[in-house]
Image: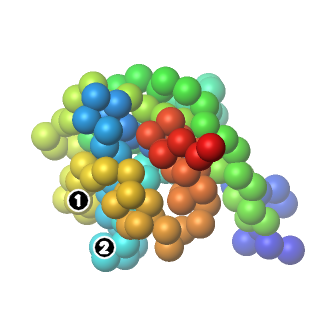
Amino acid sequence: MGTKGRETPRVVCCAIPISTAAAKVLVITSRKRQDLWVLPKGGYESVDGVLEAAASREALEEAGVRGTIKRYVTTITSPSTTYHFYELEVASLDKDWLESKERRREWVDYAEAYRRIAWKPELAQGLALSSIAPRRY
């Protein structure tokens, strides 16, 4: 079946927190596996209203990121999950945030961000389609 017991795939909204001026991506550690890095992401909730709001909420909860969604990047589907990616231009980082005792965060350049999240193909694919990725000609 592939949907992990659900009738329809789970809807996950993912923020790609960037600093355009510094050409950096903010990555965070996974809560389940502290040795792995991810992008802020989580399930869409009806209170979010729109997918962009869910991505922004997840960035705040998981990484303490405040900023503005600048653009839709892509939607990637797997048998169990539909991922919606949005670029979030970071305005500020909260010193303390909801998951601050469970995660680390770090600014890295695109190549390092890609290297760290490559273990999760959907995240790597979303990042590769972002505006911070090197242009392919």
Q: Position of residue 106 (x, y in %)?
A: 23, 53
Q: Are marks 2 and 1 in contact (CB under 8 Å)?
A: yes
Tally of numbered discs:
2
| Residue plotted at (41% across, 66% down) | 115
Residue type marked 1: Arg
Residue 78 lies in what quarter of the image?
bottom right
Q: Position of residue 94 (x, y in %)?
A: 19, 36
Q: Tag 2, which secondary structure?
A: loop
Q: Mark 1 = which residue? A: 104
- Compared with residue 118, is residue 135 higher up or lower down, i.e. above or below? above
In the image, is 136 to the left or to the right of 32? right
Q: Which part of the image, by quadrant, shows the C terminus?
A: top right
Q: Earlier in the sequence, mark 2 or mark 1?
A: 2
Seen from this angle, which residue lies furthest left? 95
Q: Tag 1, which secondary structure?
A: loop
In the image, is 78 to the left or to the right of 30? right
Q: Nearer the viewer, residue 117 or 77?
A: 117
* Mark 1 Cα shell of 10 Å, populated few (<14), some (14-19), many (≥20): some
In the image, is 88 to the left or to the right of 11? left
Residue type marked 2: Gln
* Mark 2 Cα shell of 10 Å, populated few (<14), some (14-19), many (≥20): few
- Compared with residue 13, is residue 48 higher up or lower down, i.e. above or below? above
Q: Mark 2 = which residue? A: 34
In the image, is 92 to the left or to the right of 66? left
| Residue plotted at (59% across, 66% down) | 121
| Residue plotted at (60% across, 31% down) | 72
- CA distance separating discs 2 and 1: 8 Å
Q: Position of residue 125 (x, y in %)?
A: 60, 56
Q: Which part of the image, by quadrant, shows the N terminus?
A: bottom right
